[in-house]
Amino acid sequence: MAKPLNIGMIGYGFMGRAHSNAYCTVSNFFDLEYEPVLKAACARSEEKVKDFADNWGYQSIETDWRKLIARDDIDVIDICTPNNLHREIALAAAAAGKMILCEKPLAMDAAEGEEMCEAVEKAGVANMVWYNYRRVPAVTLAKQLIDEGRLGRIFHYRSNFLQDWTISDDLPQGGAALWRLDAEAAGSGVTGDLLAHCIDTAIWLNGAVKDVSAMTETFIKERMHNLTGKVEPVNIDDACAFLAHFNNDSLAIFESTRYARGHKALYTLEINGEHASIAWDLHDLHRLSYFDHRDDSIVRGWRSVHVTDGDMPYMDKWWVPGLQIGYEHSFVHHVADFIEGVASGTPAGPTFRDALETQKVCDAVLKSAASRQWENV
Ligand code: SOE
């Protein structure tokens, strides 16, 4: 019989829903020592948090996150707030001895992130950051193939995250969901929101990033601010592209924008090694493209591997071979691995400390875009 793991959720937006769905689902598919219990949801608006709690089955609500953290019946604090609140909530939760699951990016910058790492390490509490794309089975399979040495020496890493939802200049900044356009709440634009995903996966697959040379652009310079009611300068990066060296001497090129008309969430990655290459695309997330030069030349070519067999990462937990899973399952895997880490005492990544590496790359990217120089990470 699994022991209860009481969740206190802060926030009720898109990520609050994705995480809640994962807590509700995980124990039906994974045999775990702990079972998440939706104990309390918290947000400033009583009406909105009540609707959210009723919809997902949270047993209670709070309107003040400090009260949630003070409760003895909460084991895990899940931070799904805008980025500018991550640090304060995480420090308080760690001091209260709570485990913490924090939405990405870890913090507004690496200095805040370092403080958060020190707080959870001092308190000895389990912690993890929701970089969910690592746990799409095709991406986890890519990690397995690289770790097995199938690619050989890696020469190139290229990754994009393209969207188009902010092109209209009528779109305001600030407030629910649109806080992503407000630098005060988000810290940065596509760098912290989208490239952070690409960087987390890249570090996981190919090791640490050494240095970067970046450019950013803000295409729409002023937008109406939902909180002040005034037209305010836009201080986030709408687009960012950067070159990088990894510590293993491979070269990287990354690009992200919210102005790529026609692309909604096109996260892609491609890795070229001495013997083989791998490519993956979020729009076809259950497939991994693989090319192996060691194949006989008469049948050599790009294979499109349908990642649904029971011996592929996570897939023995779901349906039968050939039946695929989707975006939301990456969050379920995230919770399952977190719980296994808590039960075994070997923490699942990315921990706060792992996510700090991504934060440092983001900081170096923004610094390089401002200085127009290469910057070390
Ligand atoms: C932004 O549109 C966003 O929702 C990000 O905040 C998520 O992290 C990404 O997975 C999808 O796009």
Image (cartoon, rainbow, N blue to C red):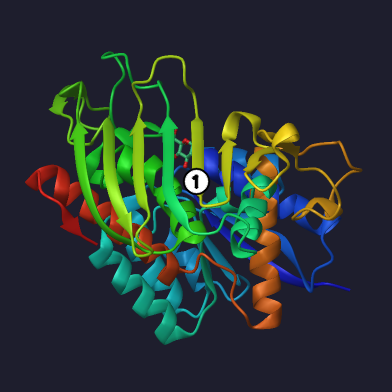
Q: Depth check: give the residue in front, 59 or 360.
A: 360
Spot occupied by residue 102 in the image (x, y as percentages of width and height): 48, 59
Q: Depth check: give the residue in front, 352 or 53.
A: 352
- Residue at 78% of width from left, 53% of height from top? 312
- Residue type (three-letter) at the residue carrying disc 1: Asn
- Regarding residue 313, the answer to whether it shows in the image is yes
- Quarter that holds the N terminus: bottom right
For mark 1, what is the residue? 272
Give the number of callouts: 1
* Residue occupying the far left of the picture: 371
Spot occupied by residue 209 in the image (x, y as percentages of width and height): 33, 60
Label 1 crowd (10 A; few <14 / some 14-19 / many >=20): some
- Residue at 22% of width from left, 36% of height from top? 236
Q: Measured along the vertical axis of the image, is residue 109 above or below residue 338?
A: above
- Regarding residue 103, the answer to whether it shows in the image is no
- Quarter that holds the C terminus: bottom left
* Residue occupying the far front of the picture: 297
Q: Secondary structure at mark 1?
A: strand
Q: Is residue 272 left or right of residue 347?
A: left
Q: Measured along the vertical axis of the image, is residue 312 above or below residue 181?
A: below
- Residue at 45% of width from left, 47% of height from top? 197
Q: Measured along the vertical axis of the image, is residue 342 above or below residue 201?
A: below
Spot occupied by residue 188 in the image (x, y as percentages of width and height): 26, 43
